[in-house]
Image (cartoon, helix red, strand yellow):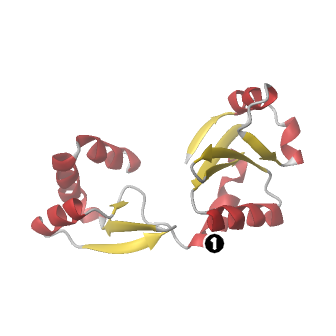
């Protein structure tokens, strides 16, 4: 999840960018100091489920079309906990942040060579490799060998 100051998005909407496809009426008077959070939903069924659930829960949101069948659903930071609960209800418990990567045969081979115990799972339509904290250093080494940016990204997700 990312956050940004609402002023940028409000300005973009006010100048008529077509990206602002849907907005809850409650968002028309949001102070410029409010923070936005968003999620990107690539699977149409997921997008529709999220929109319906947010509406039913009374969480105001905006939708931006990102093209290529992807939409971004934006909501105010103060609703993050409610949105997280909705996402868990719809998609299930997410994998641990910073301890999962998209399933890739090169990564799996590296994990096997280092005797890292991992599991495969599907979350929101994506096949993932998931491991326990005790294997972080080994996984970091595998990722660093394949792509240093991957290793840096995973460490950043873990707050390291």
Which residue in the protein does label 1 denote? 90
Q: Residues within 10 Å of mark 1 (few under 14, many from 20)?
A: some
Q: Residue at x 34, y 74 (%)?
A: 120
Quadrant of the rendering where the C terminus is positioned = top left
Q: In the image shown, does 66 or 28 lie closer to the viewer?
A: 66
Q: Residue at x 37, y 44 (%)?
A: 156
Task: From the top left corner, tell me how far across and down residue 64 is, in percent.
Answer: 69, 44
Q: In the image shown, does 90 or 136 lie closer to the viewer?
A: 90
Task: From the top left corner, tell me how far across and down residue 136 is, in percent.
Answer: 25, 58
Residue 160 in sight: no
Label 1 element class: helix
Q: Residue at x 60, y 54 (%)?
A: 69
Whether residue 72 sits left or right of residue 25 in the image: it is left
Whether 75 is drawn above or below 115: the answer is above
- Dividing the picture into quadrants, the one containing residue 117 is bottom left
Residue 86 in sight: yes
Task: From the top left corner, tell me how far across and down residue 123 is, in percent.
Answer: 47, 69
Task: From the top left corner, tell me how far across and down residue 142 is, in percent.
Answer: 18, 54
The residue at the far front in this view is: 68
């Amino acid at each position: 999840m990312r956050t940004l100051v609402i002023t940028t998005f409000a300005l973009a909407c006010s100048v008529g960018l077509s990206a602002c496809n849907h907005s809850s009426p409650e968002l028309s008077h949001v102070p410029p100091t409010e923070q936005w959070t968003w999620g990107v939903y690539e699977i149409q069924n997921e997008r529709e489920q999220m929109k319906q659930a947010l509406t039913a829960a009374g969480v105001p949101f905006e939708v931006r079309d990102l093209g290529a069948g992807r939409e971004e659903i934006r909501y105010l930071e103060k609703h993050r906990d409610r949105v997280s609960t909705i996402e868990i209800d719809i998609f299930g418990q997410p994998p641990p942040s910073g301890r999962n990567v998209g399933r890739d045969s090169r990564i799996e081979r590296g994990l096997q060579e280092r005797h890292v115990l991992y599991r495969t799972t599907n979350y929101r339509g994506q096949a993932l490799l998931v491991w326990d904290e005790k294997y972080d250093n080994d996984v970091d080494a595998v990722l660093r060998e394949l792509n240093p940016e991957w290793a840096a990204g995973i460490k950043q997700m873990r707050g390291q």
